[in-house]
Amino acid sequence: MASDDDDKLSRIVDARMKLRARFLKDADATPSVADARPMGSGPKNRHGMPQLPPDQYETRKWPVLDLGVKPTISRERWRLTIDGACARPVTLDWAAFSALEQVEDVSDFHCVTKWSRFDVPWRGVRLADVIALAEPADDAHFVMCHAYDSYTTNVPLVEAIKPDVLLVHTADGVPLPVEHGGPVRVITPQLYAWKGAKWVSRLELLREDKLGFWEERGYSNTAYPWRNDRYS
C-alpha cells in the first residue's frame, strides 16, 4: 500500500514539474509578478506589487458574496472531478483529497467589490497538484472551475498552477464555513477573488478559453488587481 502511495505521489510531483516547466517563463511574466508599473499603494507585497491594489480598502472582516444560494455539501457527499483535455480524468472523494499533500500558506484576498483582506492563513491542496493528477493534454491552456451552486469561472493554466493558488478547506485555523465556500473553494491571491470558485465541484481542462459566469456578464477575463482590471 505504501508503495502505491509513493508511486502516486511521485507521479503527481513529476506531472506538476512538467506543468511548471511548461508555464514557468510565462508565469514569471504575468502582471501580478512582473508588472513594471503596478498601480496601488502601501508597502510591497509578497510578489513585489503594492500591498493594496488601486481603489481597494483594507478590512479585517470577511464579507459574504454569492449568487444567492449557499449549498450545504457535507465532506462525505463532496466530490471533485477533474476532466476535459487530459489523459487521466479523475474524481476525488474527501479521503482521496485529504491524502494529497496538504500545504499551509498565508496570502491576501482581493474582492472586486473593493475590499481586501490581508494575511489570511489557509490550509489545503495546491490546485496544480489535482490538475497534475489528471495529466493535462499538452495543448490544454485553461481550466473552467464549476461549483455546486452552478457558478463557473475560467482561469488560464499559467495562473492556476501558481504555488499560492489552492483548493482550501481551512481558513483562519478552522474548517472553511459554508458561507465562504466550504467544504472546499479555490483561492487565487494574484487575481480578483471571483476567479476562485466557492463550493468547487469540477475542474474542466480546456484547450481554448471559455467565459465563466461573471465574465459573460462583463467582468474582466483577466482580473489583475494591480491594473484595476475589473471589467471588460
Image (cartoon, rainbow, N blue to C red):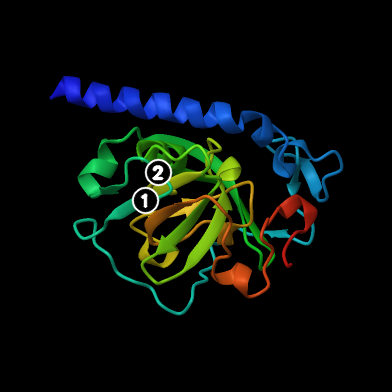
Instruction: From the image, tell me which residue sits under label 2.
Output: 86
Q: Nearer the viewer, residue 100 or 82?
A: 82
> Where residue 83 is drawn, which disc sits there?
1
Q: Kindly indicate whether the residue at mark 2 contacts the one at mark 1 (C-beta within 8 angstroms).
A: yes
Q: Measured along the vertical axis of the image, is residue 125 above or below residue 202?
A: above
Residue type at tag 2: Cys
> Where residue 156 is drawn, which disc sits there?
none
Q: Measured along the vertical axis of the image, is residue 179 above or below residue 103?
A: below
Q: Position of residue 205 (x, y in %)?
A: 46, 50
Residue at the outermost left position: 1
Residue type at tag 1: Asp
Q: Measured along the vertical axis of the image, is residue 50 above or below residue 29?
A: below
Q: Position of residue 214 (x, y in %)?
A: 59, 70
Q: Residues within 10 Å of mark 1 (few under 14, many from 20)?
A: many
Q: How many marks?
A: 2
Distance from Cα at disc 1 to Cα at disc 2? 6 Å
Q: Quadrant of residue 150?
A: bottom left
Q: Position of residue 81 (x, y in %)?
A: 32, 53
Give the SS element for disc 2. loop
Q: Is residue 32 left or right of residue 129?
A: right
Give the SS element for disc 1. strand
